[in-house]
Amino acid sequence: MTKYLIPIGKEFDVEVELDEPDAKEPKGPDDHRERMRVVTAVFCVAVAFLGGAAILGVVSRDFSALNGVWSVVSVPVSSIITFYFTRA
């Protein structure tokens, strides 16, 4: 089988400079720390609100506040848990 080389156009010199020098550099350890701070903050806020709603439910014998808080908090908490515990 013969390979064919078909020239299209003519060669020219090009020099390219990136405007953002760190655009393709890997992120350092600070990126991991920042993500862990966000995850920790989300979990702490979720636990605080769930605990407050649970105490309110025990005192008033009405757990509708706990149900409302869980309906809001469940999405970010389950997203974080899914991200960290499912590694394909």
Image (cartoon, helix red, strand yellow):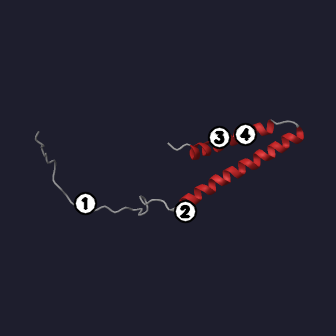
Upstream in the sequence, badge 2 or badge 4? Answer: 2
Q: Place residue 2 in its image quadrant.
A: top left
Report the residue at 73% width, 48% height from top.
47
Upstream in the sequence, badge 3 or badge 1? Answer: 1
Query: Where is residue 42 shown, x and y percent of the image?
Result: 67, 50
Q: Place residue 30 in its image quadrant.
A: bottom right
Callout 4 amino acid:
Trp
Which residue carries the number 2 mark? Answer: 30
Upstream in the sequence, badge 4 or badge 3? Answer: 4
Q: Secondary structure at mark 4?
A: helix
Depicted 14 relative to depicted 1: above or below: below
| Disc 2 to disc 3: CB gap under 8 Å | no
Q: Report, in whole angstroms, how far the alpha carbon at label 3 lies from the one at label 1.
A: 49 Å
Which residue carries the number 4 mark? Answer: 70
Which residue carries the number 3 mark? Answer: 75
Query: Where is residue 73 shown, x and y percent of the image?
Result: 69, 43
Q: Report, in whole angstroms, how far the alpha carbon at label 2 lies from the one at label 4.
A: 31 Å
Q: Is residue 85 left or right of residue 6?
A: right
Report the residue at 55% width, 42% height from top.
86
Q: Report, in whole angstroms, how far the alpha carbon at label 4 lies from the one at label 3.
A: 9 Å
Q: Report, in whole angstroms, how far the alpha carbon at label 1 lies from the one at label 2.
A: 35 Å
Upstream in the sequence, badge 1 or badge 2? Answer: 1
Report the residue at 71% width, 52% height from top.
44
Q: Nearer the viewer, mark 1 or mark 4?
A: 4
Report the residue at 63% width, 41% height from top.
78
Callout 1 amino acid:
Val
Q: Secondary structure at mark 3?
A: helix
Which residue carries the number 1 mark? Answer: 14
Q: Residues within 10 Å of mark 3 (few under 14, many from 20)?
A: few
